[in-house]
Image: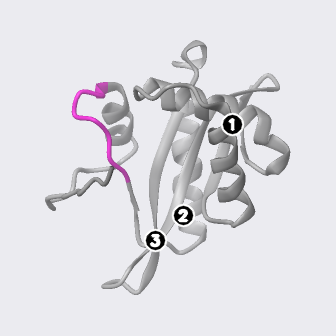
């Protein structure tokens, strides 16, 4: 049975493994120590909200939200920055359950919106987000990367 829980420091070991796999999925080398330190700071400083998908007692996915604000709307907003499901748990509904929890949490916090970015060729994720009512916005997003 799939359960969605908010991650705490008690979940750090399992979460770190998932986070390291997630980073590898996006082409980064494994670095468990840095992944753990990064997550530990986010949780300790309350800088992100992390939900875990737990299936039959095993963590099989996570999502991480970062708070931001809408100046125009004068409201909180959230960036759904990370969503990852282990390969063996894909198709079990974990992604849907995590995303729905993100929406529920954001509404409880009186957020104006949840935003995210995904690769144009990530058709599975795009299909899920659109099925859950998300739409592409009309803005052009720009980014400047620093080495």
Precedes in sequence: disc 2 or disc 1: 1
Q: Is residue 141 visible?
A: yes
Residue at 41% from the left image edge and 29% from the top image edge:
26
Q: Which mark is residue 33?
A: 1
Per the image, the residue denoted by label 3 is 68
| Dominant secondary-structure state across the stretch colored magenta | loop
Instruction: Pinpoint residue 113: horizontal percent, then vertical percent.
Output: 40, 66
Decide which of 138, 33 is in the foreground and name it: 33
Residue interval drawn in magenta: 116-123
Per the image, the residue denoted by label 2 is 106
Estimate how packed mark 2 is, as few (under 14), some (14 to 19) or many (20 or more) residues with alpha carbons within 10 Å.
some
Instruction: Pinpoint residue 15: horizontal percent, then vertical percent.
Output: 70, 37
Decide which of 128, 27 is in the foreground and name it: 27
Task: Pick out the residue farthest to the front.
Answer: 147
Residue at 60% from the left image edge and 59% from the top image edge:
48
Residue at 46% from the left image edge and 71% from the top image edge:
68
Of helix, strand and loop, which one carries label 3? strand
Q: Is residue 3 visible?
A: no
- 70 up-or-down from 61: above or below: below
| Horizontal side of residue 140 vs 89, given as left or right | left
Of helix, strand and loop, which one carries label 1? helix
Q: Nearer the viewer, mark 3 or mark 2?
A: 3
* Among the 4 quarters of the image, the one containing residue 11: top right
Labels 1 & 3 near each other (Cβ < 8 A): no
Decide which of 146, 72 is in the foreground and name it: 146
């Amino acid at each position: 049975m799939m359960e969605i829980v908010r991650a705490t420091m008690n979940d750090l070991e399992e979460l770190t493994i998932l986070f390291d796999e997630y980073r590898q999925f996006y082409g980064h080398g494994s670095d468990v120590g840095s992944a753990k330190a990064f997550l530990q700071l986010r949780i300790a400083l309350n800088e992100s909200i992390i939900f875990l998908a737990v299936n039959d007692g095993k963590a099989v996915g996570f999502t991480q939200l970062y708070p931001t604000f809408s100046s125009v709307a004068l409201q909180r907003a959230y960036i759904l920055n990370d969503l990852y499901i282990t390969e063996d748990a894909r198709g079990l509904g974990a992604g849907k359950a995590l995303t729905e929890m993100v929406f529920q949490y954001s509404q409880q916090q009186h957020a104006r919106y949840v935003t995210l970015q995904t690769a144009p060729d990530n058709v599975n994720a795009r299909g899920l987000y659109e099925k859950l009512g998300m739409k592409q916005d009309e803005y052009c997003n720009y980014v400047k990367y620093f080495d």
